[in-house]
Amino acid sequence: MSFVMPKEARTFFRTITERTVSGARYIMFDTYYVCLLLGLHARRLGPLEELEGDRFIENYPEDYRPQADFIAGLLIDAELDRKRIDVNNKVSVEREMILLLDPSNATGLSAAGGELLNRYAVGGFARIDEEM
């Protein structure tokens, strides 16, 4: 699984971070994370075509590794909600978790889970773009 940035996010956030993050430690994953959280909250998937062509990082950066389970949980919650899966239906919830998670992967996500995560980041950036 690798992280891919929404196409316009890098440029958009560069103008903000150059003006507001003087002296602070800023990493590109911060941009991705903001987009991701907004997309997950809105339950909004963006199209694959709105992702950059190349991954920008293969695994969670050191500062975000403790958040891996939290991010996976948010992804599962968003997908259960988006697909209208009843959380009391253990079989359906387990099926979704098996689809999204891969404990052998460093991120804890399957290829399908990683793709959805990237698409949620696209959806989050689209929301930012609309509001701005």
Image (spheres, rainbow, N blue to C red):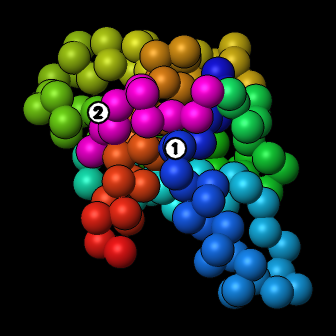
**Principal secondary structure, stretch drawn in magenta:** loop
Callout 2: 10 Å neighbours few (<14), some, many (20+)? many
Task: Give the labeled residue for mark 2.
Answer: 79
Task: Give the labeled residue for mark 1.
Answer: 6
The stretch of residues the image draws in magenta is 44-53
- Amino acid type at mark 2: Glu
- Under circle 1, the secondary element is loop
Residue 85 visible to an observer of this rendering: yes
Q: Specify the quadrant that holds the C terminus.
A: bottom left
Residue 52 painted magenta: yes
- Amino acid type at mark 1: Pro
Q: Residue 44 at x, y = what percent?
A: 27, 45
- Outermost residue, right side: 23
- Mark in the foreground, 2 or 1: 1
Q: Residue 26 at x, y = what percent?
A: 78, 68
In the depicted structure, whether residue 122 falls above or below residue 92: below
Q: Specify the quadrant that holds the N terminus.
A: top right
Foreground of the two, 114 or 129: 129
Q: Residue 28 at x, y = what percent?
A: 73, 55
In the depicted structure, whether residue 90 falls above or below residue 25: above
- Under circle 2, the secondary element is helix
Does residue 126 appear to the left or right of 101 in the view shown? left
Residue 33 painted magenta: no
Does residue 115 appear to the left or right of 127 in the view shown? right
Residue for point 26% across, 54% down: 42
Answer yes or no: do the residues labelled 2 and 1 have beta carbons within 8 Å?
no
Callout 1: 10 Å neighbours few (<14), some, many (20+)? many
Foreground of the two, 97 or 27: 27
Residue for point 19% across, 39% down: 81
